[in-house]
Image (cartoon, helix red, strand yellow):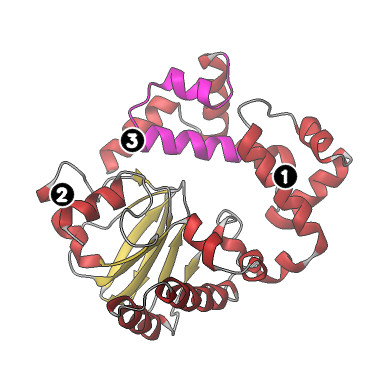
Amino acid sequence: MEKDEFIHTLFECDEPKKGFGFQLFKMEDVFTLKSSSNKNPFASHRINFFTLLLMTQGEMTHQVDFIKYDMVEGDCLFISKEQIHKFDKSPTYKGYVLIFSEDFLLRHVSLSAFAKISFLSNYHLNPSFFKDFGDINLFISLLKRELSLELGAMKEDIVASILTVFLLKAQLHTSHALKSYFGNYGQFAKFQTLVASKYKDTRLVKNYAAFLNIPLKQLNNLCRTFTEKTAKEYISNYIILEAKRCLVATNIPIKQIAYDCGFNEATNFLKFFKKITGATPSEFREFREIRS
């Protein structure tokens, strides 16, 4: 892949432009991006595809949604779509960046396997950081071999099969892996989907309970089971995270961010944000810019 195409894919919030929605890059290529474009890989940026960072040498600290992960050889970090992240400025580490689109997964991964890999959509439940994941080198070798071959239509299916095995094995490392098999998990997943689609319209827990046609107490119990938080805390944290992403990864005015987060009055948003984070939106944005 040409360098400018790599830049566009990694920083323009688009899905992979070439191939079939799956691409593998050397992590070292990131170091040359800032000098060759106006894109800064070391500043927070938002993505609209799934990403795996695979460490093969050295050490680095990678930041995802304001949480820092110290990575060394053998570690793997999963970044979901809509999250923001930034690369470590140290040029001493090596590894691979693997990106794939949701469409690629839906076309080539079975529904039963997709349902079991809960960290794809529930990254907030499962910190998708896999220490000393022993299959990284084998995984990379298999992918590089298949991607170098001309296999026609079967190429997509073969690559997807290798990816599926890796993701399923990674799922076994997540702390909440077994919970995804409980019957109540499906109901909680519906609540998550509702919050993602309706948080701009309502923050009231009773409304979400009504949408799900379950008692308010039952909804709170669901949230505590899977997140150790109440439904109100879950909704508030979701909105705060979305606001933080916009504050750091965009230049959107705070008043517009307030509106986009469901607040008719910016002052109410300011109070809401400061109550939870301890800082105003402008203070948070300024602090992150200084630290970037």
The reply to whether the C-beta atoms of the residues labelled 3 and 2 are less than 8 Å apart is no
Helix, strand or loop at mark 3: helix
Report the amino acid beneath label 1: Phe
First of labels 3, 1 by sequence position = 1
- Magenta segment: does it hold 241? yes
Q: Which mark is residue 191?
A: 1
Horizontal side of 110 relative to 28 (left or right) equals right
Range of residues picked out in magenta? 237-264
Q: Main secondary structure of the magenta part?
A: helix
Query: In x, y percent, where is residue 156?
Result: 43, 71
Position of residue 26 relative to residue 252, above or below, is below
- Magenta segment: does it hold 169? no
Give the residue number, with chain letter if any, for mark 2. 34
Q: Nearer the viewer, residue 1 or 85?
A: 1
Query: In x, y percent, where is residue 64?
Result: 41, 53
Give the residue number, with chain letter if any, for mark 3. 287
